[in-house]
Image (cartoon, rainbow, N blue to C red):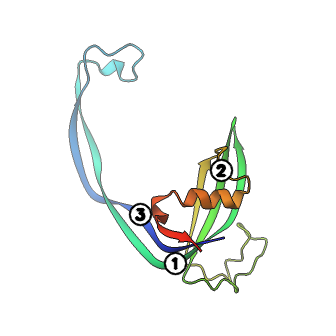
């Protein structure tokens, strides 16, 4: 199992600039509202200006290298690790008892990512397959297909 094609990395960059906006709170806020103490007032809120960039990596090979199902309170989370490779030659990848089951010292990956999602009963029961199904829904993998 793998995906092949163009992977897109999305980044946010703080431009160092700020923008100030005035927020006015209605006088008739409910007593349970978190801003109740600010009712009938205005305040200036300064926020950083964020720039969004993307980088496309064409002709890449994506492999899920590990997945686990973890219990968080009453919910379950599917956590997984995946790597991008410059080609489909994965014969030199050495499996070892590393963090995600692969020896990163001898592995030729170009990027490594982790992801965690809420477990959904519609996902396949095989965790690796479930990770691939989730990846196929992500914008980062919209230019990829099954290998």
Horizontal relation, residue 36 to residue 147: left or right: left
Seen from the viewer's position, the closer of residues 139 and 27 is 139
- Is the residue 87 above or below the residue 123 in the image? below
Q: Do the numbered discs 3 and 1 sit on residues whose CB atoms are within 8 Å? A: no
Marks 3 and 1, Cα distance to the nearest angstrom? 16 Å
Q: Earlier in the sequence, mark 3 or mark 1?
A: 3
Quick one: quadrant of the C terminus?
A: bottom right
User: Residue 97: image x %, image y %?
Assistant: 79, 71
User: Residue 20: image x %, image y %?
Assistant: 21, 43
Res 84 quadrant in image = bottom right
* Circle 2 Cα neighbour tier, 10 Å, few/some/many (<14 / 14–19 / ≥20): some
Res 146 quadrant in image = bottom right
Residue labelled with disc 1: 60
Horizontal relation, residue 2 to residue 21: left or right: right
* Foreground tag (2 vs 3): 2
Q: Earlier in the sequence, mark 2 or mark 1?
A: 1
User: Residue 90: image x %, image y %?
Assistant: 66, 83
Residue at 64 percent across and 46 percent down: it is 122
Residue labelled with disc 3: 10
User: Residue 143: image x %, image y %?
Assistant: 45, 69
Q: Do the numbered discs 2 and 1 sit on residues whose CB atoms are within 8 Å? A: no
As helix, strand or loop, the secondary structure at mark 1 comes to strand
Residue labelled with disc 2: 123
Marks 2 and 1, Cα distance to the nearest angstrom? 25 Å
Residue at 36 percent across and 14 percent down: it is 30
Residue at 63 percent across and 63 percent down: it is 81
Query: What is the count of numbered marks?
Result: 3
Residue at 49 percent across and 75 percent down: it is 5
């Amino acid at each position: 199992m793998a995906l092949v094609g163009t992977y897109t990395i999305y980044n946010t960059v703080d431009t160092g600039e700020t923008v100030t906006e005035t927020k006015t709170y209605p006088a008739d806020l409910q007593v349970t509202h978190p801003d109740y103490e600010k009712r009938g007032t205005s305040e200036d809120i300064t926020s950083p200006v964020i720039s969004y960039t993307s980088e496309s990596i064409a002709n890449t090979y994506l492999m899920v290298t590990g997945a686990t199902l973890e219990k968080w309170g009453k919910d379950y989370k599917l956590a997984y690790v995946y790597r991008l490779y410059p080609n489909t030659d994965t014969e030199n990848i050495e499996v070892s008892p590393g963090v995600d089951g692969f020896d990163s010292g001898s592995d030729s990956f170009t990027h490594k990512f982790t992801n965690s999602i809420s477990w959904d009963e519609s996902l396949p029961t095989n965790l690796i397959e479930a990770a691939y199904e989730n990846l196929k829904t992500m914008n980062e993998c919209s230019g990829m297909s099954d290998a």
